[in-house]
Image (cartoon, rainbow, N blue to C red):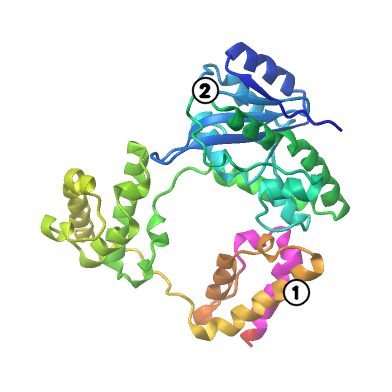
Amino acid sequence: MLIPTEPIWIDQDDQLAELCARWQQQAALAIDTEFMRSDTFYPIAGLLQIGDGKGCYLIDPLAIGNLEPLRELMLNPAVTKVLHSCSEDLEVFQCWLGVVPAPLFDTQVAAAFAGLGFGLGYANLVKNLLTIEIPKEETRSDWLQRPLSAAQLKYAALDVAHMLIVYGKLLQLLKTTERLEWVKSDCADLISNARKADDFSEAYQKVGFAWKLREQELLILKQLCIWRETEARARNIPRNRLIKEPSLWEIARKRIQDVTQLQRVPDIPSRTLKNDSETILQIVSDALAMDEAAWPARLDPPLAQSEGPLMKALKNYVREYAEQAQLPPEVLIRKKDYEHLVRSGMNGGEYRLPERLLGWRFDLIGEGLLRIVRQQNV
């Protein structure tokens, strides 16, 4: 089958509206985005690629004014949107169009369940299934420049040219192994997570060594992290350009309350010191004035070495199952899922599986994992 790979440039509203009306009748579309975010918090859409099996259409976000036909298409429940490793693409759609495409089929997720490998890149997936080489030279291009170079246009078109063929082959493999519903479930989770409203209240828990801080220090860190998350978005700058997490941790640990101390904290950008010192110090002061009822509980330290044998037993169980099922272990369970399970039973608690292991994964490994931890506790 001859696959069309020539790029078709779309920069007029009427062109896009006509195409979207046609695409509303398709069962599936191949989709990719190119974007820039080196100096911004939010990604800036530089290009949208859509492959429909008949052509590779490159849509110019910098020229299109009426995006409503595209929004309607992205939300059409009858059209499956096929993407590869789509988490960043979903963020682009959310920022640019204000919608998250649905339903979607992530070919990277599907490839893992089809036994082709975990975290497989798109070029390697195409090579694996179609024995076609895709060039990677333009991966770090400036997608906001106009006009785009011929090499950029070719690269962008090839990102969607073969995707529907890959999609069809993956569907066959997944139906044969009866794993298609697993892929659909995980892809639905990707959509759900992308649509969640921002919640900064737990951002402090991800800061390295936050577990070393005492309750009042944690409150300071929590308030500083909320400020950083809010301001990075409001100013549309990367978080670290405002201030890095280790600096926030140091401010919280030392309960810094004057400018001289603040200036001694490593790695705070000079612009932040100039513009935000007063705000930072006020956050610390306000946190120190709060009642103990507002203090967060101390965070769990890393698992003790004594939990090592249990963790090893759990990982061995999953690895053995994964080998038998010809699946990458990573599609079944994440590191934090192991930790959640082990921590739930510490100090006399009842072992509980994380929510992710309560769906279809429960019959595969969840029940066995519970059996292992309960046997260890006897």
Does residue 163 appear to the left or right of 351 in the view shown? right
The residue at the point 54 percent across, 82 percent down is 307
Pointers 2 and 1 in contact (C-beta within 8 Å): no
Percent of width and height locating residue 48: 59, 29
Image-quadrant location for residue 78: top right
Quarter of the rendering occupied by the C terminus = bottom right
Q: In the rendered image of this protein, does residue 194 appear above or below residue 219?
A: above
Q: In the shown orientation, is residue 14 left or right of residue 79?
A: left
Earlier residue among tags 2 and 1: 2
- For image coordinates 30% across by 68% down, the residue present is 215
Q: Main secondary structure of the magenta part?
A: helix
Provide the residue span drawn in magenta: 353-375
In the rendered image, is residue 101 in sight?
A: no
> Quick one: SS at disc 2?
loop
* Residue at the spot 68% in from the left edge and 74% down from the top edge: 369
Is the residue marked by circle 2 packed among few (<14), some (14-19), or many (20+) residues within 10 Å? Answer: few
The crowd level at tag 1 (other Cα within 10 Å; few <14, some 14-19, many 20+) is few
Residue 320, labelled with which disc?
1
Picture coordinates of residue 224, whole percent (x, y): 29, 54
Residue 168 position by quadrant: top right
| Total numbered circles | 2
Which mark, by number, is residue 147? 2
